[in-house]
Image (cartoon, helix red, strand yellow):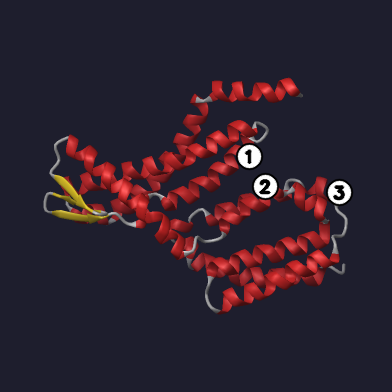
Amino acid sequence: MHHWPLILGVLAMAVPTLVSLARGPWSLESGVHGPIVLATGLWLIFRRLPEIREQMVPGNVLLTALGLAIGVPLYIFGRAFDFVSIEVAALLLVMLSVGHAYVGARVILSLWFPIFYLGFMIPVPGWVLDAVTQPLKLLVSEVVTQVLAYFGYPIGRVGVTIYVANYQLLVEDACAGLNSLVSLSAIGLFYVYMLRGSNWRYSILLLMLVVPIAIAANMVRVAALVLITFHFGDAAAQGYLHNFAGMVTFTTALLFIFLVDKILSPVRNWLAQPAEAGA
């Protein structure tokens, strides 16, 4: 019963943060995976409740106090100055500390994947977005321009701006791959853990393929938007079709991960053999 004040304190911190996420990052394309990660991450933990109850022992008081001493001030700072990334990261640290106090270090270590997976809830800071998306935008715009030029379209580019006929298109962050890259990494990680977790060699291979799949899918998205602009006008591309293209791109890339997993089944079986032979 002495842990209830800590649990109530975590709830008091979590509710306003979740409201802020719902109104902010989760309402954007870059944060669409947030609610999915939260729901599936909690499910991964709760499905192991019988195992947790058997192994739980009170955690080290000093470790719990240290986690709270770091997490609570960081949460207050992030909340006060609207640094959502710091706020969410600090909340996860506080939740981890309270969980440690209740179930102990052994259980926490056994839950390493759900804990790591929940880290995808942390919104990517703006400076990271700027640093990572610039080379991605250059790559996407260059490849799309070269491919469409090969098929005879009157297209050129300057930096991340694509010119086709009388139209000018700026390759934005949403089209450069980072948004779907983060989302696909999170969902792909969940998929690999649930279905291929016992084969860690193949899991690493499949996760490495998530990055090129996401970038390639966004190249298709940008090419489609350029073609829509050329044939139907700028309004069609920048309106409903632009948003619909994002959803289709994410779904297509996700299905492509499943397809690649199916195609690589011989590789998966081959990589599993050493582990089975050594068992």
| Vertical order, 262 against 106 (above or below) | above
Q: Residues within 10 Å of mark 3 (few under 14, many from 20)?
A: few
Return the disc, 1 or 2, that comes first in the chain's sequence.
2
Return the disc, 3 or 1, that comes first in the chain's sequence.
3
Q: Amino acid at mark 1?
A: Tyr
Residue 76, percent across and down? 63, 77
Q: Residues within 10 Å of mark 1 (few under 14, many from 20)?
A: some
Q: Residue at the spot x=51%, y=25% of the render? A: 264
Q: In whole angstroms, how far apart are the C-alphas of marks 1 and 2? A: 8 Å
Mark 1 falls on what kind of element? helix
Q: Amino acid at mark 2?
A: Phe
Q: In whole angstroms, how far apart are the C-alphas of marks 3 and 2? A: 17 Å
Residue 115, percent across and down? 67, 53
Q: Residue at the spot x=61%, y=25% of the render? A: 271
| Vertical order, 210 against 163 (above or below) | above
Q: Nearer the viewer, residue 133 or 217?
A: 133
Residue bearing mark 3 = 55
Q: Which mark is residue 90?
A: none
Mark 2 falls on what kind of element? helix
Q: Nearer the viewer, residue 274 or 206?
A: 274
Residue bearing mark 2 = 113
Q: Residues within 10 Å of mark 2 (few under 14, many from 20)?
A: some
Mark 3 falls on what kind of element? helix
Q: Would you say residue 215 is visible in this rendering?
A: yes
Residues at marks 1 and 2 touching, judged by CB atoms closer than 8 Å: yes
Return the disc, 3 or 2, that comes first in the chain's sequence.
3
Q: In whole angstroms, how far apart are the C-alphas of marks 3 and 1? A: 22 Å
Quadrant where the image shows the C terminus: top right
Q: Residue furthest bottom?
A: 80
Q: Amino acid at mark 3?
A: Gln
Residues at marks 3 and 2 touching, judged by CB atoms closer than 8 Å: no
